[in-house]
Amino acid sequence: MFKFFRAFLITLIAIIVVVYGAFTVLNVYFFAPGTVVNGIDMSFKSIDKASEILDFNDFQTEIKFRNGSYSLYGKDIGFNAKVDKDLEALKKGQNPFLWFDFYNRKAVTYDYRVTVDEVKLRQVLDKSDFLKEDKMSSPGDAKVIVKDNVAFAEDGDKGTVIDEDSLVRGVMESIQKMEHLYTVPDSCYSAPKYNSESPEVKACVDEVNEYLNLDIKYIFGDYVLQLSKEDIYNMITISPDYKVSVKKDVVKSFIDKFAKEHNTYGQEKRRFVTHSGRTAVINGSSYGWEIDSEAETEELYRVVSNKFSVDRIPAFKHKAYTYSSTGDDIGGDYVEVDLGNQHVYVYKDHKVIIETDCVSGNMAQGHGTPSGLYPIRAKQSPTILRGDDYESPVSYWMPFNGGIGLHDANWRGKFGGEIYKTNGSHGCVNLPVSVAGDIYRNVHVGMPVICYWNSDLE
């Protein structure tokens, strides 16, 4: 029994020695049991075999551009990742006689030593649309925008013009880190000359807001035109280097439009409701408002250019007596001469305050008083009316159509009726002396005079 146990023990020790020796020899050339590198079991593998396992070129990364993405494959760019030098150090650090201590071995992780063929990388990138000049869009400078009547700066389109050298450096660094996504930073792209934070742009925004804050009004009789912020903004222009100036042609267009909408002078046909309620259609070309567009363009250009806020009465070539928001330039104070019925009406605030018979131009001699709309051009008291064949002193003279006017006629004993047909004036409207003075005192220079015949009535 003892001999058997002795023989068994000797045999067991021999086996252990052989096994230990064998494993010791193996661990001289191979990694010890329990060696884990970068998550891979390298037990009993040589350094060369481990390097072969760990080394790879099957790598893919994505480049994210502003306008899309592009995939790079390791095999196309000479990619290779190695950790061989670290493996040698790891192997040297393992004691082959302690191969059995695998329970205490810790897994290790080594950084890869990555190599990339830059020439191949550039060739691959050059084939993509992202680096083709005809596919790139240039960056846009900041824009000055007006919204809700306030100016502010807004960055322009960033564009896609990219610097290839900067891109390659960035991609190389990303691949060296084994990253699978590289977002191209703004620093790789061409930047615009001006962005919303540029001093020139900020100064421009401030100046545009100064223009938008102008308070410019046109006062035209009872009508007031307030220039809107849009009107003023349309008058300015911003140069590529953010200098603000006023566009004179736009100022002129504004004044021309304003004049066209409100000028009343020169209208050949005017409609006027007479005392009887009937409408007379008469020539009104001698009465009305006419803005002096050239002079007013110069003045508004000066006002806006200097950033003045003003209440302004336009420059006029011709003026009427009044103007309302409805465009009425006759108003409620005027003189109505009903030539067909030889009667004169003086209105104040749309009510007749004086009326009288009259005698107008002699029809038989071709001196008939013309119909039309005219302004009273002057008042004289007394004066002498002179013509080719007459000289007549009068107390009250109120001309409205050249040499034709309202005046007293103390040489007449009767007025009205059909006197005008054969014994009328040289064209003036003769008035009784007793009434002429009242009319003179109640009319003013510029007040409209409306003359019409029955044939002018609709």
Image (spheres, helix red, strand yellow):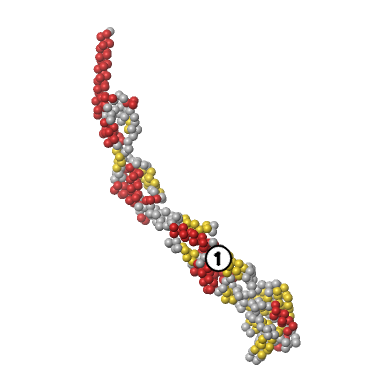
* Location of residue 94 by image quarter: top left
Q: Quadrant of the C terminus?
A: bottom right
Residue under label 1: 309
Front residue of 97/334: it is 97
Q: Position of residue 190 (x, y in %)?
A: 38, 54
Q: Quadrant of the N terminus?
A: top left
Residue 274 as seen in the image, left or right of residue 249: right
Residue found at x 30% / y 47%: 118
Q: Secondary structure at mark 1?
A: loop
Front residue of 441/375: it is 441
Residue farthest top in this picture: 1
Name which residue type carries label 1.
Answer: Ser
Judge whether residue 268 can be spotted in this image.
no
Q: Position of residue 376 (x, y in %)?
A: 65, 79
Residue farthest bottom in this picture: 389
Residue 345 vertical position relative to residue 362 in the rendered view, above or below: above
Front residue of 58/409: it is 409
Residue found at x 68% / y 88%: 393
